[in-house]
Amino acid sequence: MFIKGFAIGLSLILAIGPQNTFVIRQGLKREFIFFTAFAVAICDGALIAAGVLGVGQFVTKIEWLKLILTIGGMSFLAIYGVMALIRIFRDNKLKVSVTKQKTSPQKILVQSISFSWLNPHAILDTLVIIGSISAQYSMSDSFNFGLGAILSSFVWFFMLAFVAKTLSKYLQKPITWKIIDFFVGVVCLRVAYSLLLELI
């Protein structure tokens, strides 16, 4: 069950979304890489644990809570996406010096929580889907299944962050950073638009 949980968790998290693009961007910037990967993985792990404990099925039945999560997630992703697109018109090079860090750990923590807990799609994958699958098994099997899914989040986000860090030395030109911000902006706005369609 542990391996099955790991495989399913990894398959759900592989799709490039706002959460992944945030981790990639921090890795490329070389800003608090370990902390970023750890914070996002912890947020994901908490959702998975809650899903295994049956919280997901409870949340999906509360319409007003679903509405708040959807509106909150849509607003956050839309603002972050627009900010990323605005950065395209600036000529800042990628800052790799530790002494020039601009993002605080507190801000990264808030962003990690926002990308994880204000993203209905992430909640669907962790709380609902993983929770529903684990509900089919006995208590011990669902526990092992959940542990495997949580481990997949840690492995994926740390790998993503440190691979991005390795590539950052090749990405010093402003045009490269513009392409990255364009990709981040498009992904965030695409998800925000899909949430708007759900509201309509």
Image: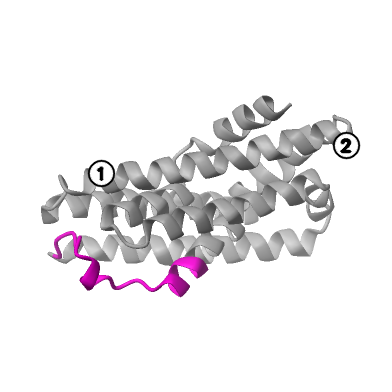
Percent of width and height locating residue 82: 36, 64
Up-down relation of residue 11 to residue 64 (above or below): above
Left/right placement of residue 152 relative to residue 138 reads: left
Asked if labels 1 and 2 touch by Cβ distance under 8 angstroms, the answer is no
The furthest residue to the right = 138
Q: Nearer the viewer, residue 200 or 22?
A: 22
Left/right placement of residue 6 relative to residue 135 reads: left
Tell me the kind of residue under disc 2. Met
The residue singled out by tag 1 in the image is: 166
- Please tell me which residue is depicted at 29% across the width and 73% down the height of the picture: 102
- In magenta, the rendered stretch is 92-110
Name the element at disc 1: helix
Q: Is residue 79 visible?
A: yes
Which quarter of the figure has residue 196?
Answer: bottom right
* Numbered circle sitting on residue 139: 2
Q: CA distance from mark 2 to mark 1?
A: 41 Å
| The C terminus sits in image quarter | bottom right
Tell me the kind of residue under disc 1. Thr
Q: Is residue 200 visible?
A: no
